[in-house]
Amino acid sequence: MAVKVAPSILSGDFAKLGKEAERMEKAGADMIHCDVMDGVFVPNLTFGHKMVADIRKHVNIPLDVHLMIVNPEKYLDKYVQSGADRLSFHYEATKQAKDNLVSLKNSGVKAGLAICPDTPAEEIFHLLDFCDFIVVMGVHPGFSGQKYIPTTTEKIRVLHDEILRRKLKVEIEMDGGANESNVKSIASAGVKVMVSGSCAFNSPTPETVISDFRNSDQ
Ligand code: DX5
Ligand code: ZN
């Protein structure tokens, strides 16, 4: 089965994000990855729920919203209302991950839990029953264009094995550092959704990057 590809508009031109999302939809993206950063959880600041709602009007494909903010529970409703189809927050940013996941599922969006490179896979095993997907970060969150941390691949394998062992329907999404040379080996560890920031946006032919990423598990 093909890997779904989610270009991250963090690498797009912020003066025209609607158009950038359209460009990726036309190039064959399966969804648009929207990175929300608060300048506290990560050392960078992007945009809030109004931007997500405005991008929503530009494309028909799902919006995959990745919250890198502290106390995400304060804002989950706003992002659900903004038209996110998939919504993830960070395990490291909250004391109530389980409640947040349950509330997201009840709101009708796909509930995702994101983990930073220093968080071991085993630490979130007890939350897998409540997740639709896990975002495994391949870089320290904050910026696009960083180098992939190679130990991420083994972490994906560990998570994938646990998901299979418990017969769960949890998708693994990999976010950060994927490129044409490493995408196949990352995908083979059990990735269902591959985020691509700089690789898709900086290419003169994003349709080729997206199609290569899509076929990376074959
Ligand atoms: C990093 C973001 C990623 C980033 C990926 O904090 O969460 O989504 O945009 O960009 P690349 O693919 O360039 O690493
Ligand atoms: Zn992201």
Image (spheres, rainbow, N blue to C red):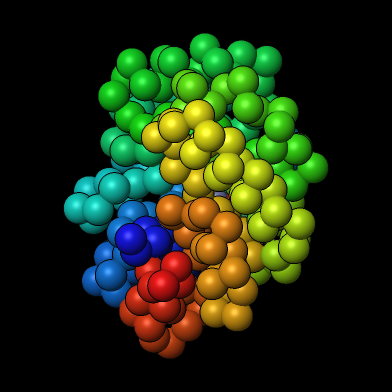
- 103 to the left or right of 187: left
- 79 to the left or right of 69: left
Residue 146, located in which quarter of the rendered image?
A: bottom right
Residue 179 image position (x, y, % from top left): 58, 74
Residue 60 image position (x, y, % from top left): 20, 53
Which residue corresponds to the image point at 28% horizontal and 24% vertical from the top-left?
108
* Residue nearest the viewer, comparing 156 with 147: 156
Which residue corresponds to the image point at 25% horizontal and 53% vertical from the top-left?
61
Residue 110 image position (x, y, % from top left): 36, 32
Which residue corresponds to the image point at 62% horizontal and 49% vertical from the top-left?
156
Residue 23, located in which quarter of the rendered image?
A: bottom left
* Residue nearest the viewer, comparing 81 with 182: 182
Residue 76, located in which quarter of the rendered image?
A: top left
The outermost residue toward the bottom is 204
- 141 to the left or right of 199: right
The outermost residue toward the front is 165
Which residue corresponds to the image point at 36% horizontal and 21% vertical from the top-left?
105
Residue 115 in sight from this viewpoint? yes
Residue 50 in sight from this viewpoint? no
Q: Vertical placement of 169 versus 211: above or below?
A: above
In the rendered image, the quadrant that contains the N terminus is bottom left
Q: Vertical placement of 184 versus 120: above or below?
A: below
Q: How many marks?
A: 0
Residue 132 image position (x, y, % from top left): 42, 32
